[in-house]
Amino acid sequence: MLRTVAARRESNALLVVPVTCLLLASVPTQAQTGAETTVSQNQLKLKKPEVTELEGVTAHAQKRPAGSNPNANPAAPYKIERSGNTKLTEPLRNISKTIIVVGKEQLADTNTTALKDLMRTQAGITLGTGEGGNAQGDRFIIRGFEARGDIFVDGLRDPGVVTREVFTAEQIEIAKGASSTFAGRGTTGGAVNSVSKKPQASNFGKATAIIGHDKRASLDVNRALNDKLSVRGNLMWQDSDIAGRDEVFDKRHGAALAADYRFNDKVEFLVDYYHLRTDQMPDRGHPWDTFTNKPADVNRDNFYGIVGRDFQETGADVLTGTLDIKLSDQTQLSSKTRTGKTTNNYIVSTPSNWTPRGQAAQALSATSTMTNRASTAGFINKSVANNTQLSHEFHLGAVEHHVVGGVEWSEEKVTNQGYVLNTYDATTNPTGIPAPALNVMNPNNHASAPQIKGRAENTSKVNGKVQSFYLMDTAKLNPQWEAFGGIRHDLFEIERQAREGTYDVNSDSKDTTNFVNGHVGVVYKPRENGSIYGSVSSSSNLPGEMYDSGGVDYGGITPLVAALKKPEKNKTTEIGTKWDVANNKLALTAALFQTDKKNKIEVTGTGATQVASQTGAIRVKGLELGATGNASEKLSLSAGAVLMDTEVTDSTLSSNIGKKLANVAEKSASFNAKYQLTPQLAVGGGAVYTGVIRAGTFAANVQNNGSNVELPSSKRLDLMAEYKVAKNLTAQLNVKNVADATIYEALYRSPSPFVYVAPGRTINVGLSYDF
């Protein structure tokens, strides 16, 4: 009842937002509706001249359609030319790092609505599972390394492990390799940065409605109220069924409001507010068959949760203010302050193996049953952060320098108070309800099961503080050569209590750690449209950096590992090349990379015999290829492929040495294309290949018979068609997983895991109206 009342209050509050956006849409302004505008990267109000000098080449600037991505090529919107992260001052072609960027046009063409939907189609990235040791929510593994705590919005870390949307995203950036210089702690395999839609200096709007498996409506309205003030509102509502999964649904609603005010030509202030609520049936997929060492051979639709009890509700309310001051033509000061709160509440059933613990594996039969068991959590993450950055361009002799320096601090307070179920216990709860035994082949999702009795008596608490300083310089030595150097110092403080307000020497811990990381790179440009680069970058992982976890294996902190003062150190070496071809409308990239981790924390033994050591070491090396943009006037595409070789190079357990890394698809590729058949009709589609993924925490698990615990490789095919019904009205069809393939996309770490099941064939039809 409390959840229902709260949801109604949130819905009533949200009704105010559509009214606001509709009023904005009707306000007469000085700018003409639908006018085209050319928008610069850093100042959306500054118009570019018709002729722009780009690195020594005179090019006629093409006007951007109103509302288009200011970082994309106007003639090839899939080709993103600049990052939205102000720490990256050069075009993507001249940055000594692999950065994959997906713009809102591609997100719309593929009908991508959640960050998880995008990440499951990206080469080199796999999904992780929610577990007892870490929160149920977005969990991504980039180039073999955990990244659930390495997600950012507009350059500041996005707190909490929740479910993330993309309705406010201008573009999503995935920086590969160790990235601490730009992003701070963690960021071993990479970091994800969502760049928000900002107010622009023109009037435009777009309304979209989708029906099918996803029922969704969204609205994006921008108004330039005068020459100083622009505002933008984004709204979203969704109610989806998950194709191929019984009882599983996904409901969301959200709003984002932003206002940009230019006091004068030198001072500008942007404020934006983000609100999101999700209501989902959490789904941990299928059980594992330890007899066949494969996912259980059951109906793909089988769901093993309890309807009426299981739930997951997440929320986010985030307010950000950004002050930009142009101190001179060469110097800019920017200060961004954010405060926010995220929540993640759930009860989720976990499919358990039907073989009792300690007994030999039993073959699956029509009478096989498993006892329903559930995980619960109630996370609240309150955060505040500030980044203040100074950017300065100057010449020292013949060398042009662009220096960026800044200070950053953040504080997060995370509490977790789970739920208590009314489970039968002869001694403590004799009137309770026993956990039901579900038939594995035909589970009853409405079985009598323990319901919510209340909240847990104890609340765990984590308090994390980070203070940072960074300095970076891009030096243009001559038209062919550029050098980059950056350094960052972080002071990380964390304190964790298993029971808030009560100190327990066996569970509670705190630590303060200083660490320094850097990045050096050299770029050679044999021609204006191409570069060849080499770089070395580093990052650090620390106990406790994953605030959602109290377990060491998941990045949490305990007294045992708090005494280990050395951070896990990571180094990425990368050489690559980037070329803009097809009249600069298509970007081609290739990179060879290697990431080495040392000082990895390992815990062996149980209970009082546990020992922690920093003996683990990992090596991941590979090749990454990419292509984005327009291959021709009519063909837009985005493609990537990653080949990796992973190895545990050192471990306190000699049996681990030489094994593959867990949770990694060493081979993966994706392709997405759109072809404009006629001025009215476009067709396209995509394909995703994901190689074998092995289970485990560190090294891949192996059964007693010597066989690997692994998910099979998978293939997915998507199709789309788009038809321009009228000048401002477009219809779109999307069919995902056309073959209705059963795809297992993630698995729990144990030798008898549960496995996530990807959605089946998903069909949606949408209408978009521009105004």
Image: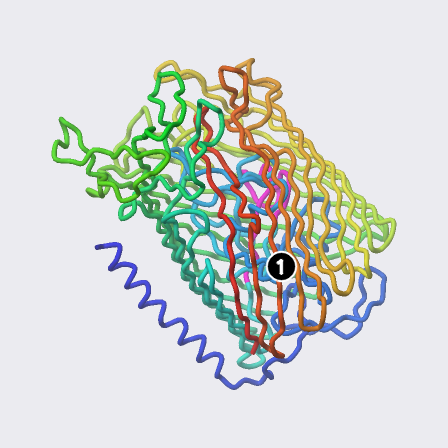
Query: Element type at marker 1?
Result: helix
| Disc 1 residue crowd, few under 14, some 14–19, many 20+, Cα 10 Å | many
Q: Which sits in the foreground, 456 or 732?
A: 732
Image spot of residue 539 (x, y percent) = 60, 36
Q: Is residue 163 visible?
A: yes
Q: Which sits in the foreground, 61 or 345?
A: 345
Does 327 sit left or right of 609 as displayed?
A: right
Image spot of residue 664 (x, y percent) = 58, 33
Q: Which residue: 44% across, 62% down?
A: 215
What residue sits right under mark 1 in the picture? 106
Does 560 sit left or right of 328 as displayed?
A: left
Q: At label 1, which amino acid type do we have?
A: Gln
Q: Which residue: 37% across, 28% down?
A: 365
Which region is colored magenta? 174-196
Which of the 4 image quadrants contains residue 489?
top right
Image vertical order of residue 589 relative to residue 583, above or below: above
Image vertical order of residue 755 relative to residue 27, above or below: above
Image spot of residue 347 (x, y percent) = 31, 43
Does 46 sit left or right of 613 as displayed?
A: right
Name the quarter where the N terminus is drawn.
bottom left
Q: Which residue: 71% across, 60% down?
A: 636
Which of the 4 image quadrants contains residue 8?
bottom left
Name the quarter where the C terminus is drawn.
bottom right
Q: What kind of colouring is applied to the model shown? A: rainbow
Q: Which sits in the foreground, 288 or 498?
A: 288
Q: Is residue 180 visible?
A: no
Residue 382 in magenta?
no
Tell which residue pokes out farthest to the front in this image: 366
Q: How many marks?
A: 1
